[in-house]
Image (cartoon, rainbow, N blue to C red):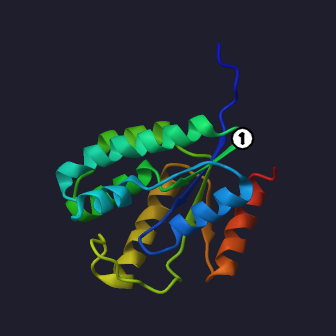
Amino acid sequence: MNTRSAPYRVVFTGSECTGKSALARALSAERLAPYSDEAARLFVTENGREIVEPDLAVIAAHQRTLEDAAIAKATALVLHDTDLFSTVIYAQHYFGNDASEVLDSARERRAHLYLLCDTDLPWQNEPLQRSKHSSQERAVLTTAFKTLLKEEGCCVEVVRGIGASRLANARAALKRHYPN
């Protein structure tokens, strides 16, 4: 029988170009905690193309695999650069797909804390990004994230700031909920 307790799970979430990956890596290094990458970003990088609707199932499965691998390495804390709620938001926004199966899985795997990265960082255009319409679309997506996470009863802290202050704000939010 496995008596090991589940680690405290923190997800960095939000629209594109909001510093999720940088924050996840930085706090992972500080806290010596494993983290999982964003499956959608890896998919785009590995395939050299934009995501199309049939890719969603593959991305969701890979996201679960990445999260599970990080959880397996964790002793007390694990960090995720997004989770399945992000897949749901993007499926709804870009493809009009309700992603009901992914949403069911996201509910089952809900993390303890969501650090919602705000859009106060300058927009940086990246190749193959989903958000082709710049900062305006990021604001729409941020509202969608806030709405869904609230509807799902998730514990959410909004992270703002530029550079070191953003990291300090993420660190403080984590400490409020996970003081270890």
- Residue 137 image position (x, y, % from top left): 34, 78
Quarter residue 11 falls in: bottom right
Q: Which residue sits at x=46%, y=51%?
A: 83
Residue at the right extreme, as displayed:
180
Q: In terms of image quadrants, where is residue 45?
A: bottom left
The type of residue carrying mark 1 is Ala
Q: Is residue 128 above or below residue 47?
A: below
- The relative height of residue 79 versus residue 122 in the rendered view (above or below) is above
Percent across and percent down for residue 104 are 39, 38
The quarter of the image holding the N terminus is top right
Residue 96 horizontal side relative to residue 8, left or right? left
Q: Position of residue 42 (x, y in %)?
A: 36, 57
Mark 1 Cα shell of 10 Å, populated few (<14), some (14-19), many (≥20)? some
Q: Residue at x 23, y 53 (%)?
A: 97
Looking at the image, which residue is at 47% across and 54% down? 37
Q: Is residue 109 visible?
A: no
Q: Position of residue 179 (x, y in %)?
A: 81, 53
Whether residue 155 is visible here, answered yes or no, is: yes
Q: Residue furthest top?
A: 1
Residue 127 falls in image quadrant? bottom left
Q: Measured along the vertical axis of the image, is residue 52 above or below residue 117?
A: above
Residue at 48% across, 56% down? 82
Label 1 sits on a secondary structure element that is loop
Q: Badge 1 is on which residue?
A: 76
Task: Tell me how many marks there are.
Answer: 1
